[in-house]
Image: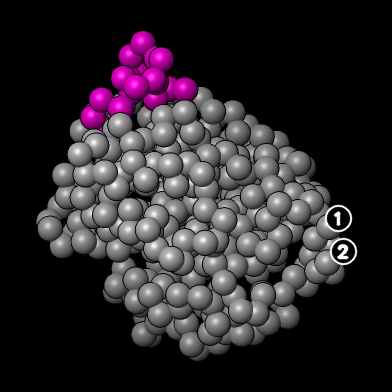
C-alpha cells in the first residue's frame, strides 16, 4: 500500500494489539465509507478516482457505527466493573449508553431509524427493554457495533454469544440480528486468537449449525413471544438459517473471487445484518494481508459502505493488530484517544 505504517499506534513491545487494531480499523473503515454511502460504484469512481487509491477524508469523521461501538465498549467496561458479565450486569449500562447516544447532539451522522426508534423507547424507564426492541428489524445496526464483545478478554464462549445477542436485542430484536451479531463477535474473537482467514468461514458455519435451535433465555428472556414464532427454538432458527444462506453466498464468492467487482453483487448490499456480515467478511478475505485495500474495496461498494467497511476493518485489525494501519490515517481519526484507550485496556 502507498501509506506507511508508523509507531504512533504501536503497543509496548511484546503486547498483543488485536483490540487496538480492530477498533481503529473499524473507525477507519467507517470514516472511509461514510462519504460513499448511498452512492453506486460508478458515482464513487467518478468523484473519488480509482478505488485502490481512495483517500481518507479530511477531517476523518465517523458515523453512528463507531459512535455506537464506543457506547457498547463503555457499557461492557462498566458491566465488568460490577463482576462477571451477565444479562443483569450488562443490561443497565448498555441501555444507559444507548439512550445517551440517542440524546447526544453529536448523533447527527445518518443514524439508523431502528436504533432511533428503539432508543427513544428505552429512554422511558417504565418500559422494559423487551417492549422497546424492534422485533421486526434485522438491519445491520446491531452487528456493526458488536466488535467490543469479540475483543474484551476473559469471556467464556457462552458469555460472548449471549452478550452479543442481548446488545442486539435492545434495538434489533429480529432473530437474524441476534445471530449475525453473535457471528460477528465470534469472527472478531477467532481472528484475534490467531484463526487463519481461510479457516474462518468454516468456523462460522459450524457455529451457526451448533447454535441453530439454541435460544438463550438467560440473556433474552421472553423476547421471542413478541414474534409470530410458535416456540423459542423456531424463532432463533430463522436467524441462523438466514446467516447460513448468506455464508453459502460468501463461499461461492470466495471460490471464484473477483477483486475488481462491487462486493455487494456477490453477498448483498449490507443494509441487513447477515449481508453486512458476509460482505464485510468478503472484503477482508479478498485481501487478508492488505488491510487498507480491504477497506477501500468495502468503501467503494454500492451498499451500506460505512458499515461494510467498518466490519472489514474490525476483522483485519483483529488479525493484524495496530500496525496494520497507516500512521497518516490513525493520527487523525475521530475519537482516536478513546479508541486507543479502550484498545489498550483490552490488549493489556
| Nearer to us in this view, 288 or 53 | 53
Q: Residue placed farthest to the top in the image?
A: 230
The N terminus, quarter of image = bottom right
Please state the horizontal and vertical placement of residue 269, each as a whole percent of the image. Answer: 67, 43
Most common secondary structure along the magenta stretch:
helix
| Above or below, 281 relative to 70 | above
Please say whether residue 233 is one of the residues in the magenta stretch: yes
Say which mark, if any, is on residue 46: 2
Please say whether residue 299 is one of the residues in the magenta stretch: no
Give the residue at x 36% y 85%.
12
Please state the horizontal and vertical placement of residue 146, each as a whole percent of the image. Answer: 41, 52
Give yes or no for contact between labels 2 and 1 (Cβ–Cβ under 8 Å): yes
Q: Quadrant of residue 118?
A: top left
Give the residue at x 66% y 74%.
56
Q: Marks 2 and 1, Cα distance to the nearest angstrom? A: 6 Å
Which residues are the magenta region?
219-240
Say which mark, if any, is on residue 42: 1
Binning the other alpha carbons within 10 Å of mark 2 as few (below 14), some (14 to 19) or many (20 upward) gives few
The C terminus, quarter of image = bottom left
| Nearer to us in this view, 28 or 124 | 124
* Whether residue 248 is visible: yes
Please state the horizontal and vertical placement of residue 131, each as a whole percent of the image. Answer: 30, 31
Q: Quadrant of residue 20?
A: bottom left
Look at the numbered disc 2 and give the secondary structure of its residue.
helix
Q: Residue placed farthest to the bottom in the image?
A: 7
| Nearer to us in this view, 203 or 223 | 223
Look at the numbered disc 1 and give the secondary structure of its residue.
helix
Binning the other alpha carbons within 10 Å of mark 1 as few (below 14), some (14 to 19) or many (20 upward) gives few
Give the residue at x 29% y 47%.
123
Say which mark, if any, is on residue 325: none
| Above or below, 230 relative to 79 | above
Relative to 326, 21 lies left or right: left
Amino acid at each position: 500500500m502507498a501509506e506507511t505504517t508508523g509507531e504512533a499506534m504501536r503497543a509496548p513491545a511484546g503486547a498483543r494489539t488485536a483490540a487496538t487494531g480492530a477498533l481503529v480499523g473499524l473507525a477507519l473503515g467507517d470514516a472511509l465509507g461514510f462519504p460513499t454511502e448511498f452512492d453506486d460504484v460508478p458515482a464513487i469512481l467518478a468523484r473519488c478516482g480509482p478505488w485502490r487509491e481512495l483517500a481518507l477524508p479530511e477531517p476523518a469523521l465517523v458515523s453512528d457505527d463507531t459512535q455506537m461501538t464506543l457506547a457498547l465498549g463503555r457499557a461492557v467496561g462498566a458491566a465488568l466493573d460490577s463482576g462477571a458479565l451477565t444479562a443483569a450486569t450488562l443490561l443497565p449500562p448498555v441501555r444507559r449508553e444507548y439512550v445517551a447516544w440517542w440524546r447526544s447532539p453529536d448523533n447527527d451522522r445518518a443514524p439508523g431509524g431502528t436504533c432511533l426508534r428503539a432508543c427513544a423507547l428505552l429512554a422511558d424507564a417504565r418500559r422494559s427493554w423487551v417492549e422497546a426492541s424492534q422485533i421486526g428489524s434485522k438491519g445491520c445496526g446491531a452487528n456493526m457495533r458488536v466488535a467490543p464483545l469479540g475483543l474484551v478478554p476473559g469471556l467464556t464462549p457462552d458469555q460472548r454469544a449471549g452478550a452479543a445477542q442481548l446488545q442486539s436485542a435492545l434495538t434489533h430484536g429480529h432473530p437474524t440480528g441476534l445471530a449475525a451479531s453473535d457471528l460477528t463477535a465470534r469472527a472478531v474473537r477467532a481472528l484475534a486468537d490467531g484463526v487463519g482467514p481461510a479457516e474462518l468461514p468454516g468456523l462460522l458455519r459450524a457455529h451457526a449449525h451448533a447454535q441453530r435451535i439454541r435460544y438463550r433465555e438467560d440473556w433474552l428472556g421472553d423476547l421471542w413471544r413478541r414474534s409470530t414464532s410458535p416456540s423459542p427454538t423456531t424463532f432463533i432458527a430463522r436467524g441462523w438459517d438466514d446467516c447460513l444462506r448468506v455464508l453459502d453466498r460468501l463461499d461461492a464468492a470466495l471460490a471464484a473471487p473477483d477483486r475488481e467487482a462491487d462486493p455487494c453483487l456477490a453477498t448483498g448490499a449490507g443494509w441487513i445484518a447477515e449481508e453486512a456480515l458476509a460482505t464485510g467478511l468478503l472484503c477482508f478475505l479478498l485481501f487478508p494481508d492488505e488491510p487498507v485495500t480491504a477497506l477501500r474495496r468495502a468503501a467503494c461498494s454500492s451498499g451500506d459502505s460505512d458499515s461494510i467497511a467498518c466490519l472489514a476493518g474490525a476483522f483485519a485489525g483483529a488479525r493484524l493488530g495496530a500496525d496494520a494501519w497507516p500512521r497518516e490515517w490513525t493520527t487523525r481519526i475521530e475519537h482516536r484517544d478513546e479508541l486507543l484507550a479502550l484498545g489498550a485496556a483490552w490488549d493489556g
